[in-house]
Image: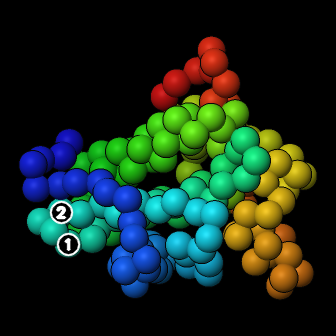
Amino acid sequence: MTDSNTQIRLATPQDKEAVTRVMQEAGLETEAALADGTTYWVLEQGGKPVGAIGLEHGDGASLLRGAAVLPSVRGKGLGRQLIMSAIQYAQGRGDRAIYMFSKGGDWSNFGFQQVPLAVVMGEVPNAPQIRAYQARSERPGGTTWMRNLSVGASKA
């Protein structure tokens, strides 16, 4: 639950340090944060950044990038609000799906289902996160997920 002291807003280039700090404290990779072709949000409480999330946009699909909330504010539903904001934004831009890489957690609660890595790599091949993995000749670790945003798809 949030209060009037909490807001989610679009990140600007001046927010890069705050977005990076929040994601690093959550143990997430921050390479290419706020790169061209991405949209990020900052969750603020009392005017201080306590959460962040991003989307890397492809042609009709996006890759969720870093859903992070500082440990001091976890357990209040703020992470869910960040994720739902990103999903709504992707729906509004007409994306048919959102993809993500995850090293833990069950994302089915948010309407995601597991998919093969090849699906994600094929759907958003130019996303900064994927290009960074390719530049390092690495594969993303963990599980790959997709949330269908097509009309009639289930909602979380």
The image position of residue 15, as x and y in percent, is: 37, 76
The residue nearer to you, when weighing 78 against 141, is 78
The residue nearer to you, when weighing 103 against 140, is 140
Q: Is residue 131 left or right of residue 79?
A: right
- Residue at 12% of width from left, 47% of height from top? 3
The image position of residue 90, as x and y in percent, is: 56, 42
The residue nearer to you, when weighing 111 against 48, is 48
Q: Is residue 151 left or right of residue 121?
A: left
Disc sitting over residue 145 in the figure: none
- Residue at 41% of width from left, 44% of height from top? 85
> Is residue 48 positioned above or below 67 on the image?
below
Q: Secondary structure at mark 1?
A: strand
Dot 1 alpha-carbon crowd within 10 angstroms: few under 14, some 14 to 19, many 20 or more:
few
> Mark 1 = which residue?
48
Judge whether residue 120 can be spotted in this image. no
Q: How many marks?
A: 2
Measure how far apart labels 2 and 1 are at the Cα level. Answer: 5 Å
Indicate the amino acid at tag 1.
Lys
> Mark 2 = which residue?
45
> Is residue 149 positioned above or below 103 on the image?
above
Quarter of the image containing the N terminus? top left
